Amino acid sequence: EAQVTQNPRYLITVTGKKLTVTCSQNMNHEYMSWYRQDPGLGLRQIYYSMNVEVTDKGDVPEGYKVSRKEKRNFPLILESPSPNQTSLYFCASSLLAGTGYNEQYFGPGTRLTVT
Amino acid sequence: AQSVTQLDSQVPVFEEAPVELRCNYSSSVSVYLFWYVQYPNQGLQLLLKYLSGSTLVKGINGFEAEFNKSQTSFHLRKPSVHISDTAEYFCAVVQASGGYQKVTFGTGTKLQVIP
């Protein structure tokens, strides 16, 4: 089954404790992206990747890191989480078509609480 | 820079009544347009998309949207809503060219269908 998986689905942590949220897709998609969803703000892009070893900042990258060492995986790293990073996080992937756009497939989300 | 505006944060509507969810965008280049739906406690799934061609686009669950280039709008419509349509709806704009891809989401509209 084609899917995007995220782990963990729920996470409660304390300020300053490094954490990683994993994202994996089995569709051989080039493009992968991380979003955070906050009430009234919709989805805001944190980082995206066009392919292996190619990443770039989205609209709200501060406090986050990513890596793309393999095509299927795109982990989101919070080196020193703070309470303002409490949010619902989504990973998404899509093909990167040359002449058009293919829709993004979203993971189930990770609800992160930083106390 | 591109942006997406969903002016209505919440839209209550009675069951079997028609509904229109508004989306306006701004961009200096050609874009692709999407509507996603998020049911409670779930990820996002694609409702419909406009890439090119006919400006009236039909999606899943009886939804349709019309691309209006002169008004830079992509409003979502359904002639008769059901309780099961209660969800949050997101409009998204994608700028894609030469391998570059930029995705921007609106802030979402919560559709509440009243029995």
Image (spheres, coloured by chain):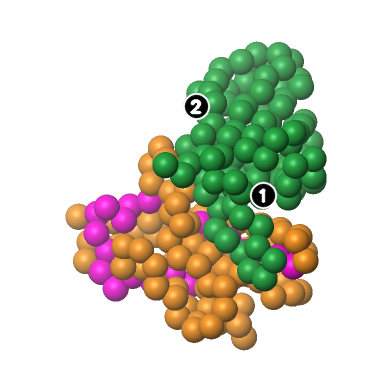
Chain colours: A green, B orange
Q: Which image quadrant is residue B23 in?
A: bottom right
What residue sits 68% from the left and 31% below the top?
A: A76
Task: State the separation of the CA atoms marked 2 and 1.
Answer: 24 Å
Q: Secondary structure at mark 2?
A: loop
**Is disc 1 surrounded by few (<14), some (14 to 19) or many (20+) residues within 10 Å?**
some
Query: In which chain is the residue bearing label 2?
Result: A
Inspect this view and state whether residue A10 appears. yes
What residue sits 61% from the left and 15% below the top?
A: A13
**Residue A34 locus on image (x, y percent):** 65, 41
Q: Is residue B78 magenta?
A: yes
Please tell me whether the stretch drawn in magenta is mainly helix, strand or loop: strand
Q: Which image quadrant is residue B18 in?
A: bottom left
**Residue A32 locus on image (x, y percent):** 65, 45
Inspect this view and state whether residue A60 appears. no
2 and 1 marks in contact (CB < 8 Å):
no
- Residue wearing tag 2: A9
Q: Secondary structure at mark 1?
A: loop
**Taking A96 as reference, is B114 left or right?**
left
Q: Is residue A69 magenta?
A: no
Q: Amino acid at mark 2?
A: Arg
Q: Quadrant of the N terminus of chain A?
A: top left
Task: Classify B50 as above or below A44.
Answer: below
The span shown in magenta is B75-97
- Residue wearing tag 1: A30
Query: In which chain is the residue bearing label 1?
Result: A
Q: Which mark is residue B36?
A: none
**Is disc 2 surrounded by few (<14), some (14 to 19) or many (20+) residues within 10 Å?**
some
**Residue B6 locus on image (x, y percent):** 55, 62
Q: Amino acid at mark 1?
A: Glu
The numbered mark, 2 or 1, whose residue comes first in the sequence reads 2
